[in-house]
Structure formats: C-alpha cells, structure tokens
Amino acid sequence: MEVIQLLEYAFLFALGAVLGSFYNVLVYRIPRGMSIVSPPSSCPHCGAKIRWYDNIPIVSYLLLRGKCRHCGGRISPRYPLVEAFTGLLAVLCRLRFEDIFLSLVFFVFFSILLVASLIDWDTFVLPDTFTLGGLAFGLVVSFFRQDFSLKESLFGAFVGGGFFLLIYLYYTKLRKMEGLGFGDVKLMAFIGSVAGVWGVAYAVFLGSLLGLLYALPIILKNKSLQFALPYGPFLSMGVFLGLLLDLKRFFL
C-alpha cells in the first residue's frame, strides 16, 4: 500500500472521527429537543463546559481516562466508540466503493442509520428527521448515481416500506397490539431507497437473525417473550453487513 493511500485513509479516519463526535451530539440532544449547536458541549455530571483540548475525538477520552477533568465523573465509553466506528466507517466506504461519489453516498447512508439506531436504542423512537429525511436523500441521489436509477430507488422504497407496513397493519389492526413501530416502516423505505431490494433483504434477514441472537439469552434468562427490543438497530446492522460484504455476489 502506497504512502499516499495510507495518508488518505488516515485523513478519512480522522474526518470520520470528528463527524462521529458530532453524531454523539445529535444522539444526545435531538431526543431531548435541544439545539444541536448551542450551548457548547458540557459534562453531563457537573455541567462544566468542555474545552476544545478535552473534546478531541478518541484522544481526549483516552488522556482523561474516561473522566471529566473538573468533577471526575465517568464519561460513557460510547462516545469514543462512536467516534472510532465512524472513522472506520469512512475508511470502509472508501475501500468498498471505488467510485468516490458512491462511497460518499453510502457513508452518509450508514451515518444516518448509525445516529437513528442509537436514538432508537435509547428511546424506542426513530425520528422522522432521519427516516423521512433519509428517504428524500435516497431518492434525490438516485438521479446522480451510475449504479442505481430513480426507478430502482422508488421500487426499493416501495418494497421495504410496503412489506413492513403490512406487518404493522397486521399487528395493530388484527391483533390489536404493536408488533413493530411505524418508524420501522419509514426506516425500511429509507433503506430501500438507497440500497434497493437487496438492501431490504439484508436488513430483514440479517437484521432478524442478529435480533434473535441478541434476544435469545434474554428469553432463556427470563423464560418469557414479553420484553421490548428496538428493531431499528438490527435492521441497520443487517443492511450494513450485507452491503459491506457484498453478499449478493453469492446469489448471482
């Protein structure tokens, strides 16, 4: 691997980590109805303003050993993990998709899924800002993609959203219970608009498998199926793994 290429990946990782720091802000503030630009970042324990040198992605967390400089309160390891994952995500998209524009499209796609999934995990809510905004993103960028047409984007959104809409209606209208949230319907339409029917298939099958693997120990421990689990993170992970590994090549 050439030095220039290594520098490119290092730059992408650093840029991704910076964006990951911003994603942490979105995950924390959007569910609470807070502005994403003000006030500046502060310690969740003592409220002290976090200085720029204590807000360097990953590095500051390690130097401070995961504690606030002012009060010594523990800072969640989720923050550096999201930063590191987003940095890695930027590199993986560049490696997986040779076309620069396409790698950018999927970086944005996976970033939206990441933020939406973390919010869903915390609150059991998938904000329309990400699901419907993501759907609009998928439809618009299809005009500029060489590998994917508007027709395919619309069809993918219809299949993903339509399939989950039927499941949603089955539970709410016939069984009088909520088997999945309507946010999952919109999330699947978004996934289909960017990743097409293959992305929908990855999300459904891999996502369901991952969800089952996660839920199985809980079921065995509690000896009950009565528990709530956000579906969005597993659907997102399913399409992420399917696209990253390009699983459709094994079927075509």
Image (cartoon, rainbow, N blue to C red):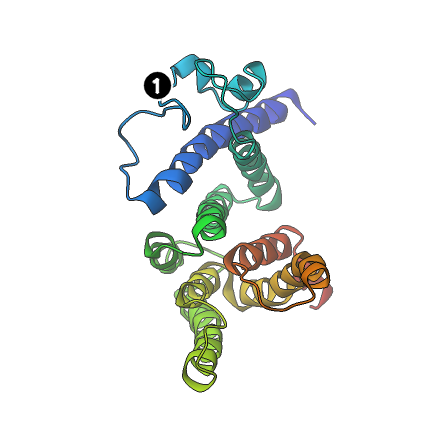
Inspect the image, locate mark 1, and give the three-letter code of the amino acid beneath it.
Answer: Lys
Residue 134, given in percent of the width and then of the height, sits at 38, 55
- Residue under label 1, please give it: 49
- Quadrant that contains the N terminus: top right
The residue under the point 50% across, 29% down is 17
Q: Name the element at disc 1.
A: loop
Q: Name the residue furthest bottom.
A: 174
Residue 174, given in percent of the width and then of the height, sits at 45, 86
Residue 4: quadrant of the picture: top right
Check disc 1: other Cα within 10 Å, few if <14, some if 14-19, many if 20+.
some
> As displayed, is residue 168 above or below residue 113?
below
Residue 142, given in percent of the width and then of the height, sits at 40, 58
Q: Nearer the viewer, residue 57 or 146?
A: 57
Residue 3: quadrant of the picture: top right
Would residue 49 be found to the left or right of residue 170 on screen?
A: left
Number of dots carrying numbers: 1
Residue 196, given in percent of the width and then of the height, sits at 50, 65
